[in-house]
Amino acid sequence: MKLIKMVATLLFVLSLGSGMLFADIITNGNFSSGTADWTFTPAAQGSDFIIVPGGYPGSNLALFGGTAVGYYDTLSQTLNTQAGSQYLVTFWLEDTYGPALANFVVSWDGTTKINVPGATSFGFTEYQFAANGVGNDILSFAGYQLPSFYYLADVSVTLGEPVVTPQGRVEATPEPGSMILFGSGLLGLFGALRRKFGMSV
């Protein structure tokens, strides 16, 4: 019985720890609360931005339109990042009208990471990029689309070094430092549980 209790406790802590290692640090990345936790900056001319319900599984949509070429509506969020750590940024984007007078730019701390011109229409497509954290990093999405919209959905930012899976998808894996800290914590917990349940190796 003691062994069962100890193993159950370790498994519970392991499940919590793995969730922390892969936690999404974006708040309201599916826009379920509209633009809450995001900062919206309207274009200086021709702003045309709206949040609409549904349209993508598990996410509302942020629509970037516009009536003036070269003027961007911008949605940004300041993230509680760890300096020196790597992050994987993932989002889904659709452009149902093209070619068009349009452009969509994704930036990390003011540096352009992804640029999507309105050369052609496309369905929901997953975009990803790696970014280095410096602490309080700013993720920004900016766009305009004449005469339709870019559709943004399901934004996430995950701590970890990006790796390519055998299926070709990029995923975040815990950094070595994070794994060492987590492993040390598990060893300490194991020792404490051994003492608590009076078990020997």
Image: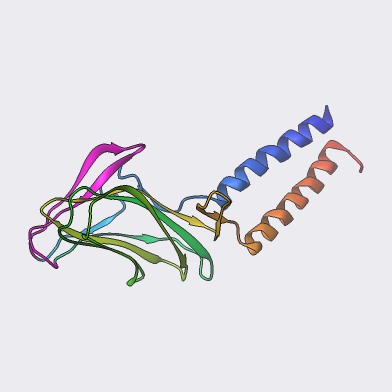
Q: Is residue 132 above or below residue 171?
A: below
- Is 23 displayed left or right of 183 in the figure? left
Viewer-side residue, 82 vs 95: 95
> Is 90 displayed left or right of 147 in the figure?
right
Quarter of the figure with the C terminus: top right
Extreme-top residue of the structure: 1
Q: How is the image coloured?
A: rainbow
> In which image quadrant can residue 34 be found?
top left
The structure residue drawn at horizontal position 35% and vertical position 50%, both measured from the top left corner, is: 125
Residue 110 in the image: state x and y as whole percent: 32, 72
| Residue at position x 26%, y 44% in the image | 61
Q: Nearer the viewer, residue 87 or 77?
A: 87
Q: Is 47 above or below relative to 196?
A: below
On the image, the x and y values in percent for residue 77 come to 33, 59
Can residue 47 be seen? Answer: yes
Point 62% across, 47% down: residue: 17
Compared with 189, 40 (above or below) is below
Q: Position of residue 39 (x, y in %)?
A: 26, 58
- Please state the extent of the stretch shown in magenta in the rendering: 45-70
Q: Residue at x 14, y 68 (%)?
A: 70
Q: Position of residue 51 (x, y in %)?
A: 21, 45
**Is residue 139 magenta-colored?**
no
Tell whether position 65 is magenta: yes
Quarter of the image with the N terminus in it = top right
